[in-house]
């Protein structure tokens, strides 16, 4: 039996990158910039300070699955995150799969790849940001923490979570309540829960 065709792709093809999505808007390839660097991050901070906007960042410590990164960037765009920061090594960057899964968000959310994540976190601390990392070992739920100020949410890699030095650089650790049999959520789902809890708190605090 001949397989049905969807968007030019063969249904059931395990090697397909991602399905076509009606939400994806065409982007000029010549103007597309896949990632930014430490200097761009400094500029983003300066612009936020000039506009008197409270920074809201997301740090991903070695997320490697392009589907996870794409979903995370889509959520980060919806939550109003000012920049997503990730290490250059042992982490996925912006690929065509990431762009498709993000339904275009990868072309708009500033994605900063840094050489030394711990050093970048220290620089952001000097700029006044507080770091909340997710960990199964945390004593408090993410709902118990104040997420309204200058903030960077920190989430770790699939399976292993945050690296030791990254966790040590966090000011607070938080967990998500798990009422079922599995120990944790997928990193893209956990990111969505954490970011939108911060969104909820920030909206309630807004004048």
Image: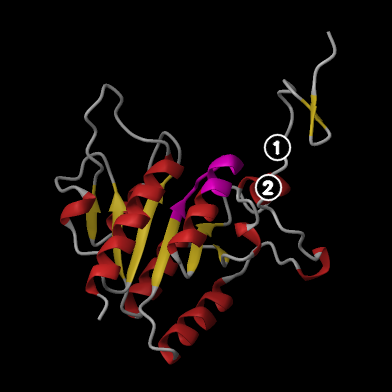
Q: Is residue 177 left or right of residue 169?
A: left
The quadrant of the picture occupied by the C terminus is: bottom left
Which coloring applies here? secondary structure
| Residue drawn at x 29%, y 61% as measured from the top left | 200
Q: Is residue 122 left or right of residue 46?
A: left
Tell me, yes or no, whether the highlighted magenta stretch contains residue 149: no
Q: Residue furthest top?
A: 1
x then y, percent, for residue 124: 38, 73
Tell me, yes or no, whether the highlighted magenta stretch contains residue 70: yes
Q: How many marks?
A: 2
x then y, percent, for residue 84: 50, 62
In space, the residues marked 2 and 1 are separated at their CA atoms by 8 Å
How dense is the environment of label 1, judged by Cα within 10 Å: few (below 14), some, or many (20 and up)? Answer: some
Is residue 91 in view from this perspective? no
| Residue drawn at x 20%, y 64% as measured from the top left | 146
At mark 1, the secondary structure is: loop
**Label 2: which residue?**
100
x then y, percent, for residue 93: 63, 52
Q: Are marks 2 and 1 in contact (CB under 8 Å)?
A: yes
Q: Is residue 134 left or right of residue 67?
A: left
Q: Nearer the viewer, residue 189 or 64?
A: 189
The quadrant of the picture occupied by the N terminus is: top right
- What range of the chain is rendered magenta? 60-71
Vertical placement of residue 199 versus 207, above or below: above
**Label 1: which residue?**
19
At mark 2, the secondary structure is: helix
């Amino acid at each position: 039996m001949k397989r049905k065709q969807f968007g030019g792709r063969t249904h059931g093809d395990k090697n397909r990158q991602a399905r076509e999505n009606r939400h994806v808007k065409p982007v000029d390839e010549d103007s597309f910039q896949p990632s930014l660097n430490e200097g761009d991050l400094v500029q983003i901070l300066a612009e936020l300070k000039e506009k008197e906007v409270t920074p809201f960042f997301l740090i991903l410590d070695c997320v490697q699955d392009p589907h996870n990164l794409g979903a995370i960037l889509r959520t980060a765009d919806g939550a109003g995150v000012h920049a997503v920061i990730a290490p250059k090594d042992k982490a996925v960057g912006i690929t065509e799969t990431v762009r498709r899964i993000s339904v275009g968000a990868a072309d708009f959310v500033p994605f900063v790849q840094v050489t030394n994540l711990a050093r970048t976190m220290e620089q952001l601390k000097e700029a006044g940001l507080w770091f909340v990392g997710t960990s199964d070992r945390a004593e408090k739920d993410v709902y118990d923490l104040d997420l309204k100020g200058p903030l960077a949410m920190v989430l770790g890699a699939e399976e292993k979570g945050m690296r030791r030095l990254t966790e040590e650089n966090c000011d607070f650790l938080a967990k998500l309540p798990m009422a079922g049999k599995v120990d944790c959520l997928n990193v893209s789902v956990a990111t969505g829960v954490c970011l939108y809890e911060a969104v909820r708190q920030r909206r309630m605090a807004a004048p």
